[in-house]
Every structure is written in structure tokens, then in C-alpha cells.
């Protein structure tokens, strides 16, 4: 089976820095392991480093059955703004031109967003009677409305109406829809104006269990030691991710000011500089910057719980962040401010604690209550790892997704 996978804004097999593998890497690797030929389409512009990978359209034969096709675009400095929209428009235009030069696949798995690239590939392949699965991970274009004041919401929707139009057409044209949870799939089906059928699928953003060499672990441990993040058995909560407006770090700062717990906020992003200033007076908060997958793994072994300080927005309520799967794979409890599907998962399986961003049950209160209750943390840790193996084991999850694509291609 020949499969096209389109995923932009994610790490690729060719990237350095040891970033966490996401859908692009995980699915393409799983397809290759099952003996299929894969063309992985992505942007030449690296969303994380904000640099171009090669500077042009490129074809990289990563392995006998995996070809990576990079599509050129202008790039952008900020994740929010017109520059990013211009980049996506140019990316879609160049993608359309490159697709027409290539032989068609048996099936395609198309990442959404960006809206523009998803629309171009879905439209082209359905016209050529190729089955397509639209993989919906973010609620675009709805989330674009957040950039506008509430009073201007109606005018903003008019201005963004072309995006809403092509998004609706993309959902409708797709052979099947895929998303990370049932609520997110329901949202996607609503956009497509149809009911769920056997071609639709739920594929969680689960993560593989860590598999690092002894050298990688030793080097990562030494690096963390130098940063003051030692294997000292202290109550430590850690966050690893992009530091942007999707997260509210105020409760972490307040908890650090009021408790003896240690906190690690690893990553980089537009909120990093401001956050560094705000925690500069705190000795129990460490910001080590971007960390590799091996460093993230060792950090997890030195943490008592993982933090997911996600803002409680409507689209986040439909999803389960990838940080949850990282925590479960490491057998760690999750402390989070999000409600909806993620809160239900935590409370039903007793794998963590949900705190209020504003309210009586704050993160500070949660930390103070848990400091002397190590048995509770151990129970939640055991539940977390058990849930990962029962429902979100990586190889089984992606093998099932591959089988789904095999059925659709027939």
C-alpha cells in the first residue's frame, strides 16, 4: 500500500534536537514497520526552530519505504498573526503544484490544521477518487476568533469567512474523519454535517515508552544535575512543552511561593522571557529551556507528578493533551487545570488531580494537601501506568490506525 501522510508544524525524522515524536513521525514509522510505502509531506519551514530545513522544495529518501517531501514557504516569526496565515497560503499553493507531479497514493492521511494545505490535498485526491482521512487535532478556524475582542467577534467571523468556507468543504469532502477523542470527533462531524460511520476513527496522541541508550541516559542525567534538577527524592512537578498563550503558569508561580515543592518548566516559546522574569525570585522553580527526549525522560524519573496547566478553553475541553500520555507512559500523576474530556479521564481513573485556576481548590491547596501523602501519589502513579497499558499502549494504538487505513484503501 502506498500512503501519503501530510503533517506540518511537527518534528520530522530528519530533525535534530530530540523533540518529542508526534503524529508525522509516529504514523509514518508505523506504516513502514507494517511494510507500506510512505510519502510524508511537510513544510520545509520548521515550526519549532523557526528556521527553514533546506530552503527549497526537497525530496529526502529517509529509508527504502519512507520518502520525505518538504514544501517551501516564507516562514514566520510568531505563531499568531498574519505572517503565519501568509505562510500557510503559500505552502498550500506550492503543495498543490508539487502534488500534481507525483503518482497518486492508495490512501492519504491528512493533518488538519493548517486549513489551506488540508483543503488543497483533500480536494485534489478526492477529485482523483483517492480515499482520504482528515486528522483533526485543533479546532480551526474557530480558534482564530480568539485573537479578536469579543465585541468584534461578528466582524471577525465575516473577515475569516473564507477559512470557514474551505474548512467546511474539507470536512465534507474527506472520506473519513479522525480525531483524538470522541468529543473532538463529534465536533468534526458537526462541521461535516453528517453522522459518524465506520470510516471515522479516534486515534489518541499517545507516546511510545522511552527507549534510550545507557549513554543517552547518563548524559541527560548529568545535564539535569548541572541545572540543579537532581535525583534527590524531593516533591517535584514538571512541565515540558511550548511556552505560549495556551497555558496559564500563574497557579504554578503561586504554588511555588507558598509551598516547598520544586517545579521545573522546560521548553521555550513566546511566553518564555516574561515567565523567566516572573520566577526570577523563586529558588524552587527551574527553567532549563528546550530539553531533548532523553532529558525529558530522565526529568520524569525525577518528578513526583506532571503539570498540564492548560487554559480551560472550549477546544481544549474536547481534547486530551499529549502531555497526559507522556505522564501515563512514565507512570506519573497529572495535575491539571483543564476540564471536559481530560478531567473526566483523570477522575474516572484516579490518575491525577484537577485544580481550579481561580477558586478554592487551587494548585497551592492541592500541593499542600499532597505533600505528606506519598501513598496517594503512589496509587495515582500505578493507576496512570496501568491505564496507559490498558488503553493507550503506543504500538497497539498505531497498529490499529494502520489497519484502519488498510481497510479504507481496499
Image (cartoon, rainbow, N blue to C red):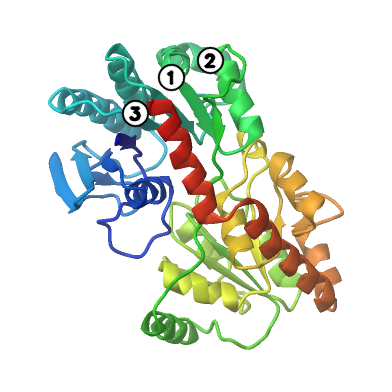
Mark in the foreground, 3 or 2:
3
Which image quarter holds the C terminus?
Answer: top left
Q: Would residue 112 be seen by someone viewing this image from the given angle?
A: no
Q: Residues within 10 Å of mark 3 (few under 14, many from 20)?
A: many
Q: Whole-Å distance between the Cαs marked 3 and 1?
A: 11 Å
Identified at 40% across, 46% down, the residue is: 27
Which image quarter holds the N terminus?
Answer: top left
Q: In screen coordinates, is 239 left or right of 54?
A: right
Residue at which label 1 appears = 174
- Of residues 301 and 154, the one drawn nearer to the viewer in this rendering: 301
- Of residues 106 and 335, the one drawn nearer to the viewer in this rendering: 106
Q: Residues within 10 Å of mark 1 (few under 14, many from 20)?
A: many
Q: Would residue 337 be seen by someone viewing this image from the given angle?
A: yes
Q: In screen coordinates, is 295 left or right of 373?
A: left
Residue at which label 2 appears = 192
Question: Residue 390: x and y, percent?
Answer: 67, 55
Q: Are marks 1 and 2 in contact (CB under 8 Å)?
A: yes
Q: Whole-Å distance between the Cαs marked 1 and 2?
A: 9 Å
N-terminal-most mark, 3 or 2:
3
Q: Residues within 10 Å of mark 2 (few under 14, many from 20)?
A: some
Amino acid at each position: 500500500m502506498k500512503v501519503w501522510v501530510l503533517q506540518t508544524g511537527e518534528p520530522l525524522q530528519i530533525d535534530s534536537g530530540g523533540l518529542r515524536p508526534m503524529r508525522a513521525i509516529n504514523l509514518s514509522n508505523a506504516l513502514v514497520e507494517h511494510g507500506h510505502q510512505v510519502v510524508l509531506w511537510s513544510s520545509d519551514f520548521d515550526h519549532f526552530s523557526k528556521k527553514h530545513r533546506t530552503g527549497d522544495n526537497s525530496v529526502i529518501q529517509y529509508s527504502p519505504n519512507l520518502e520525505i517531501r518538504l514544501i517551501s514557504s516564507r516562514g514566520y516569526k510568531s505563531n499568531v498573526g498574519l505572517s503565519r496565515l501568509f505562510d500557510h497560503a503559500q505552502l498550500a499553493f506550492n503543495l498543490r503544484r508539487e502534488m500534481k507531479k507525483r503518482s497518486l497514493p492508495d490512501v492519504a492521511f491528512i493533518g488538519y490544521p493548517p486549513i489551506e494545505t488540508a483543503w488543497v490535498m483533500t480536494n485534489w485526491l478526492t477529485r482523483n477518487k483517492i480515499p482520504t482521512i482528515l486528522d483533526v487535532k485543533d479546532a480551526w478556524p474557530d480558534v482564530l476568533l480568539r485573537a479578536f475582542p469579543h465585541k468584534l467577534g461578528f466582524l471577525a467571523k465575516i473577515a475569516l469567512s473564507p477559512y470557514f468556507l474551505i474548512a467546511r468543504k474539507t470536512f465534507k469532502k474527506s472520506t473519513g474523519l479522525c480525531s483524538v477523542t470522541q468529543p473532538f470527533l463529534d465536533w468534526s462531524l458537526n462541521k461535516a454535517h453528517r453522522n459518524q460511520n465506520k470510516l471515522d476513527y479516534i486515534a489518541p496522541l499517545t507516546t511510545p515508552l522511552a527507549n534510550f541508550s545507557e549513554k543517552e541516559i547518563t548524559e541527560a542525567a548529568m545535564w539535569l544535575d548541572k541545572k540543579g534538577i537532581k535525583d534527590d527524592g524531593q516533591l517535584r512537578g514538571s512541565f515540558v512543552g511550548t511556552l505560549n498563550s495556551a497555558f496559564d503558569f500563574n497557579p504554578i508561580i503561586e504554588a511555588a511561593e507558598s509551598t516547598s515543592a520544586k517545579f521545573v518548566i522546560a521548553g521555550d516559546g513566546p511566553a518564555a522571557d516574561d515567565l523567566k522574569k516572573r520566577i526570577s525570585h523563586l529558588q524552587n522553580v527551574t527553567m532549563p529551556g528546550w530539553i531533548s527526549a532523553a532529558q525529558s525522560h530522565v526529568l520524569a524519573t525525577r518528578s513526583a507528578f506532571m503539570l498540564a496547566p492548560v487554559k480551560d478553553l472550549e477546544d481544549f475541553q474536547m481534547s486530551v493533551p499529549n502531555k497526559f500520555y507522556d505522564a501515563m507512559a512514565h507512570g506519573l500523576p497529572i495535575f491539571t487545570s483543564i476540564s471536559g474530556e481530560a478531567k473526566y479521564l483523570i477522575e474516572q481513573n484516579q490518575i491525577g488531580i484537577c485544580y481550579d485556576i481561580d477558586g478554592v481548590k487551587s494548585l497551592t491547596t492541592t500541593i499542600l494537601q499532597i505533600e505528606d501523602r506519598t501513598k496517594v501519589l503512589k496509587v495515582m502513579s500505578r493507576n496512570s501506568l496501568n491505564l496507559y497499558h490498558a488503553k493507550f499502549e503506543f504500538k497497539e494504538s498505531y497498529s490499529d490506525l494502520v489497519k484502519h487505513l488498510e481497510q479504507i484503501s481496499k
